[in-house]
Amino acid sequence: MKAFRWGFVTLVFVYLYLPIALLVINSFNVSKYGHEWRGFSLKWYEKLAGNDALMQAFTNSLVIATLAATAATIIGTLMALAIYRYRFPLRKTASGLLFVVMLSPDIVLAITFLVIFIALGIQLGFWSLLIAHITFCLPFVVVTVYAQLNGFDKNLLEAAQDLGASESRIFLRIILPLVMPAVVASWLLSFTLSLDDVIISSFVTGPGFEILPIRVFSMVKVGVSPEVNVLATLLLVISLTLVTLSTLLLKRKKPQ
Amino acid sequence: MQFRRFSILLTLFWLGLFVLVPHLLVVLTSVMTPDSEHLAVWPVSGESWYRLREHLYLQVFWQSLWLSGITTLICLLVGYPFAFIIAKLPRLWRGVLLFLMIVPFWTNSLIRTYAIKLILGNKGLVNSLLLGLGIVDEPVQLLYTEFAVIFGLVYVLLPFMVLPLVSGFDKLDESLLEAARDLGAGFWQRFRLIILPLTMPGVIAGSLIVFLPAMGMFYVADLLGGAKNLLLGNIIKNQFLVVRNWPFGSAFSVALILIMALLMWLYFIANRRINRQGGLQDESL
């Protein structure tokens, strides 16, 4: 029974990782089509470095993911705090709207973003991508931070309040340090969601600011592009580094 | 007070401007008249809604529902036992395996779909394997079929099924299972009477998170299914970005939102019923 369990788990992970492993392996493969191993080479890495448009899209994607994750984490943390701590009109509506964003299929969110940007006269490009990415990351930040807020001792906040601390001081000195793990987790989750997105970006992108999925889509629709294998490898390395760093940082903080 | 007001206003402003108003605008657009220059103009027109009844579009609706349904079913059949096994592991292992489920997301789902294309192609891994083992003499056409689309959808969406299921199994009270075992219930009985009903919210949540997005994933259908309008997402994308008939595209999206609302309503009803049943069981215990 135990062997069967592990066999099943292994099989699922093989399914999840085989395609990615092939991309990584083929990024070093001399053969363009990757049907067989023809020797180790870094020529696709050089080719990517020489492909200005693709490199630009790659950089733009990382920029959007970093900015969107940072902004979504800040705004989302404040939202979680507002919904958790304050009573205000439309509070239920606000959490309902977050729920809608979380459950709406990407294609629906994509057109709602497109329609509002056109209606507001915001030019499609950097800002539209940034706002859209921030918005679709928000509910995940709020849920994560809210869960942690719910877990801790309310007496701490009341004590601080009784001692005359202002709201911003309570937030910065008590709440923020306590929810820090959730904040870091939210940032990573947002970064992941932003990098992974295809559908929403396809709708709100503009000619002035191209990001990865749009560029890649036109490349892989017809043929085979070894540079895409290199991109996949680089994305994995960058993300793994980020996660390792954040885990180390969090671990070092804990013993205090 | 400054800080408090700021966080409340930010919340209401952002969600109002970028979530509530856009959704209302889409509903509004769906009843406007298409216009090649200004995208959508007044007066009110029911034309877009009427056109949804055309045979071609009804067919896409059914096809979408069917492909997403099969995808959800496969994700559930694989994800349920998988989540069960993971949830019962020691903490450390559990964390590691859940983390490993997220890593593939960092490559962007479009690139992952491209990888699937390489595997299912005529000279891809699967066909080389089949040919090499002598199971088939000629490459089997896997790419550009419905099979390929379902394969790709399951690949991209499986983690979304597993995560809510794992948290569902986490909440499962182990002592209930022990009690049932002590009273002589076999595995099948424990599964049917305790495990399945109590994890039902996770099952429904996971199914929603897989089923709804699946209908919109135009790039999976484009890359793996060939240039056919297989999913609702393909039609919506074409209407918005190619044909530029925004009212018609909006009508499609509102139809999708209505399907979503219906399913969510069913979810709440099911959840309530399960909770009530749970309450009754508690009383009888």
Image (spheres, grey):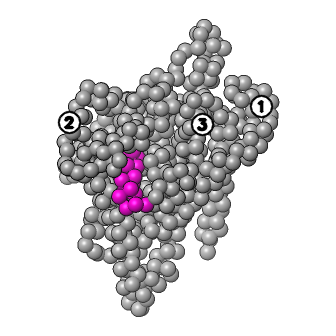
**Residue position for label 3:** A219
Element type at mark 3: helix
Residue B226 makes an appearance in the image? yes
Element type at mark 2: helix
Q: Amino acid at mark 3?
A: Met
**Which residue is painted at 55% across and 58% down in the image?**
A64
**Residue position for label 2:** B50
Residue B106: % across, % down? 58, 48
**Residue position for label 1:** A30
- Name the chain letter of the residue that bears numbered label 1: A
Q: Nearer the viewer, residue A67 or B100?
A: A67
Residue A87: % across, % down? 29, 75
- Nearest to viewer (mark 1 / mark 2): 2
Q: Amino acid at mark 2?
A: Tyr
Q: Amino acid at mark 1?
A: Val
Numbered badge on residue B60: none
Packing grade of label 2 (10 A; few <14, some 14-19, many >=20) is few
Chain-order first, disc 3 or disc 1: 1
Residue A52 horizontal side relative to residue B195, left or right: right
Is label 1 in contact with label 2 (beta carbons under 8 Å)? no
- Name the chain letter of the residue that bears numbered label 3: A
Element type at mark 1: loop
